[in-house]
Image (cartoon, rainbow, N blue to C red):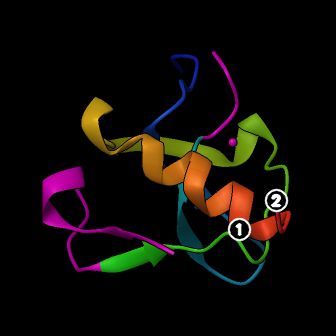
């Protein structure tokens, strides 16, 4: 498996079901959809930021374009009430 990189969207096999995850660590609601490689529109929720074991990441499905990465920072700032 390749190393997940910041801005990539991966499928993670969680206990209850497969979920898309947005990698935000350096090499951490943003809308995601077909442009990022997902079959349906959804959102990256920062209400439940949590680590995901790399072994649970099964397949890279897309990448958040560089011009949208500022949305990660804005969402994390809102989460921390900065």
Task: State which quadrant residue 47 falls in.
Answer: bottom right
Left or right of residue 40, residue 79 in this image: right
- Region rendered in magenta: 24-41
Res. 24 in view:
yes
Residue that appears at 70% across and 56% down: 76
1 and 2 marks in contact (CB < 8 Å): yes
Q: Quadrant of the C terminus?
A: bottom right
* Badge 1 density bin: few <14, some 14–19, many ≥20, Cα 10 Å: few
Taking depth in this image into account, of 25 and 9 the one nearest to the observer is 25
Taking depth in this image into account, of 60 and 45 the one nearest to the observer is 45
Res. 9 in view:
no
Q: Is residue 33 magenta?
A: yes
Q: Position of residue 38 (x, y in %)?
A: 26, 64
Q: Quadrant of the N terminus?
A: top right
**Residue 49, above or below 26:** below
Q: Position of residue 8 (x, y in %)?
A: 43, 37
Q: Is residue 53 magenta?
A: no
Q: Which residue in the structure is indicated by mark 1?
A: 78
Task: Please tell me whether mark 2 sits on a helix, a strand or a loop.
Answer: loop
* Badge 2 density bin: few <14, some 14–19, many ≥20, Cα 10 Å: few
Taking depth in this image into account, of 19 and 42 the one nearest to the observer is 42
Task: State whether the magenta stretch is mostly helix, strand or loop.
Answer: loop
Q: Which residue in the structure is indicated by mark 2?
A: 82
Task: State which quadrant residue 31 falls in.
Answer: bottom left
């Amino acid at each position: 498996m390749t190393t997940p990189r910041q801005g990539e969207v991966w499928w993670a096999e969680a206990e209850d079901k497969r979920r898309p995850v947005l990698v935000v660590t350096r090499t951490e609601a943003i809308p995601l959809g077909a442009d990022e490689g997902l079959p349906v529109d959804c959102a990256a929720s920062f209400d439940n930021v949590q680590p995901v074991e790399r072994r649970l990441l099964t397949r890279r499905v897309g990448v958040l374009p560089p011009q949208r990465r500022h949305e990660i920072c804005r969402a994390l700032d809102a989460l921390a009430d900065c």
